[in-house]
Image (tube, grey):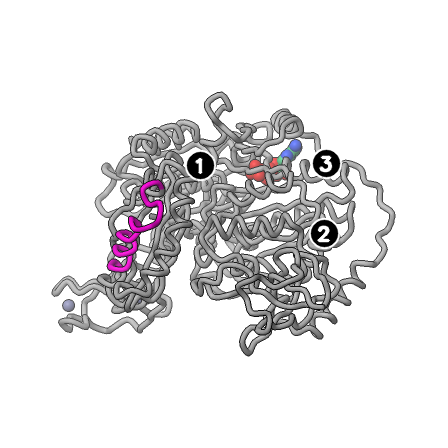
Amino acid sequence: MSHSLPVLVHTPAHSQVAGPLTYLSEQVLPAGTLVRVPLGQRELLGVVWDAPADAAPDHLDPEKLRPIAGRLDGIAPLTPAWRQLVSFAANYYQRSAGEVALAALPPQLRDLNTLQLARRLKRHANAAGADLPERSIAIYSVALTVEQTGAIAQFNQQPGPFLLFGATGSGKTEVYLHSVQQLLASDPSAQAIVMVPEINLTPQLEARFMARFNPLYGDNAVVSLHSGMTPAQRLKSWLAAHGGGARIVLGTRMAVFASLPNLKLIIVDEEHDPSYKQQEGARYSARDLAVYRGRLEGAKVLLGSATPSLESWHHSRPASQGGRYVRLEMPSRIGANAALPLVRRVDMNHQPKKCVISPPLLDAIVQRVARGEQSMVFLNRRGYAPVLHCADCDWKSECPHCSAYRVFHKIDRTLRCHHCGFTERVPRACPACGNPDIAPLGRGTERLEEHLAELLAGVRRPNSVSELWPEGEPVRIARIDADSTKLKGELESQLARVHSGEVDVLVGTQMIAKGHDFRRITLVAAVNPDNALFSSDFRAPERLFSLLMQAAGRAGRDADISGQSEMWVQTFHPKHPLFEALKRHDYPAFAAEQLKEREQAAMPPFSFQALVRAEARTQEVAQGFLTAASAAASTLPDAEHLLVHITLYPAVPMSMQRVANVERAQMLVESPSRAALQRFLTAWQAVLHATRQQPEGKGLMRWAVDVDPLAI
Ligand code: ADP
Ligand code: ZN
Ligand code: ZN
């Protein structure tokens, strides 16, 4: 006789097939089993989602059910906890469980046919079966600092979740290593997830973890999971984790969905980083899911940052005030004289008009060059100039497809749209009036690099007179941004040049401000950070403060030279409280001020938000859909109750209103209660689907909900 199996497959996001499909199977397959099933003409990967039933559900005609095509042999079923994590994420972020589950599995499980997969699995089984030599498992001993010891002691005494609030260079990574190490030593099957925000930060951490753990637990103890890996590598890591052989999974946000049968610890490094939020499909926050998953599976959760997100900071207030996280503090940098850098504000109101690098900053850079030290100058805009402009007729280099200007890239003389990619050669004359004298407006990293080269042209590096440079070698300037690192390996090689001292002045975007451990940099400068002070995005100050603190943290990591290290900020608002707090390295003061403002304005974390976005050929259609769906909310059964704590704002154009000829609109939904917001969104889904079928949905290209959005 046949059993009917509920199987989750990847159905299109808005097909409204939210739950599992029913298939027949001769065998009783336990929930969590990976199977292949037919859907239309195709054969898809699926996950048995529930216990099998003897009979098909009543509403289905048993005659029409199709049998599964087969099961994936040699892969243990996914655990109930993993399925629960997927269900929760799907519900919370308003997507189908099939989409979330299948996106969380390695692509090769979907893409390889049964035969290819069987071969692959056999190979991994053989590799994993190789005997490990006997090893003595001793706790690797670095003498922990007093602050590290204190943090670990608290970590061991309480269930958490924990927020490790530690200055840059305070030894947070050592705390991560230590907590993983004591876990693995105490429990022979325990596993841990360690997450970092960006792929280009994984190699450094990977090296530190492998150096520590491979000698103890073998070469497969640490595996990585991130989008920079090949599909074959990802499958291999995933299988090692799923099989229990890998003890540590190190990865980016996707690692939160890794299948680990014995998960006991989740670490989220730089927990404030926006890249933990997925920005397409199911827009999940890996940090928030880590906290949920920890509770679900009884795993400890350790979030760490020098500049925590205001959400996590707020959660870690004293328990007596309602805090839910335990705050662990490590305020001091490691090393005898490892002071944090001196923050210097340059009041641009008193500098020569239109100057880009103020004379005192230039002077400070020249001094660094003379001492053989490095400087880092960052500006959050790549390209040569953000706009090309005709002074005669006021033509500007608008993108014909987007509500944005095309950026002038001097290197290849192109105008490039950073939103849709539309690229053209720079015109010889103004396309509108023929004026040959069109000029760049504003400044990106490319132009800043050129400008610095001019300013430093007369400066020579000390002791560099040679046959090649009879008057001494000029200052060596390098630039790192998305343009200079497009090709694989370029970022690594450029970073290596900075590390080995082949660069005196490094210019770049925020890419260089994060995480990298530059030893010889003693000056970091933010050339023009003011924009974020007055942005319409209420999170802009939070991001700026954390970026500047992180950037300051790049200076003087070498204890021997940190005595002279400085962070320079050029600003027209030197007395702004954000810069006052930065000057004192006082994150708590900054956070207190921001939280006060957020509380007064009833903004997160004092309220909860979701955004519905809609895209169409015209704003009218995009907004019309949202407005109709909003009005229809009141027709929901139980609407009175559902709408009590909900504010539905009017539909408005998104701040980037048009991209690639698509008009984009959004509508904010807000509530003081997370539960009320969730209840409403869940009920409202059906209305959104229905509205799409109404006249108001005509011409709509797509819509999506973003829960806890990071950019409004
Ligand atoms: P963070 O992650 O907080 O920025 P790291 O963990 O990278 O800081 O530590 C900063 C530096 O201090 C690193 O070079 C690290 O090797 C060193 N360090 C960390 N802990 C100790 C310790 N207990 N004793 C000596 N050096 C340490
Ligand atoms: Zn013109
Ligand atoms: Zn464009």
Q: Which residue is denoted by mark 2 in the rendering? A: 246
Secondary structure of the residue carrying numbered label 3: helix
Among the 4 quarters of the image, the one containing residue 74:
bottom right
Q: Badge 1: few (under 14), some or many (20 or more) residues near its Cα, within 10 Å?
A: few
Which of 368/240 is in front? 240
Q: In what quadrant does ligand 3 lie?
A: bottom left
State the separation of the CA atoms marked 3 and 1: 29 Å
**Which amino acid lies under the numbered mark 3 shown in the image of this protein?**
Gln
Secondary structure of the residue carrying numbered label 2: loop
**Which amino acid lies under the numbered mark 2 shown in the image of this protein?**
Ala
Q: Quadrant of the N terminus?
A: bottom right
Mark in the foreground, 3 or 1: 1
Q: Is 323 a magenta residue?
A: no
Secondary structure of the residue carrying numbered label 1: helix
Q: Seen in the image, is 322 located left or right of residue 414?
A: right
Q: Which residue is denoted by mark 1 in the rendering? A: 311
Identified at 53% across, 48% down, the residue is 88
State the separation of the CA atoms marked 2 and 1: 32 Å
Q: Which residue is denoted by mark 3 in the rendering? A: 182
Which of 589/567 is in front? 589
Q: Seen in the image, is 408 located left or right of residue 201?
A: left
Q: Is residue 236 visible?
A: yes
Q: Main structural element of the magenta stretch: helix, strand or loop?
A: helix
Q: Is residue 439 visible?
A: no
Identified at 59% across, 36% down, the residue is 172
Q: Residue furthest bottom?
A: 41
Q: Badge 2: few (under 14), some or many (20 or more) residues near its Cα, within 10 Å?
A: many
Q: Is residue 552 above or below residue 123?
A: above
Q: Residue furthest top?
A: 320
Position in image of residue 620 (x %, y %): 22, 62
Specify start and end residues of the magenta stretch as a single range. Answer: 623-641
Q: Earlier in the sequence, mark 2 or mark 3?
A: 3
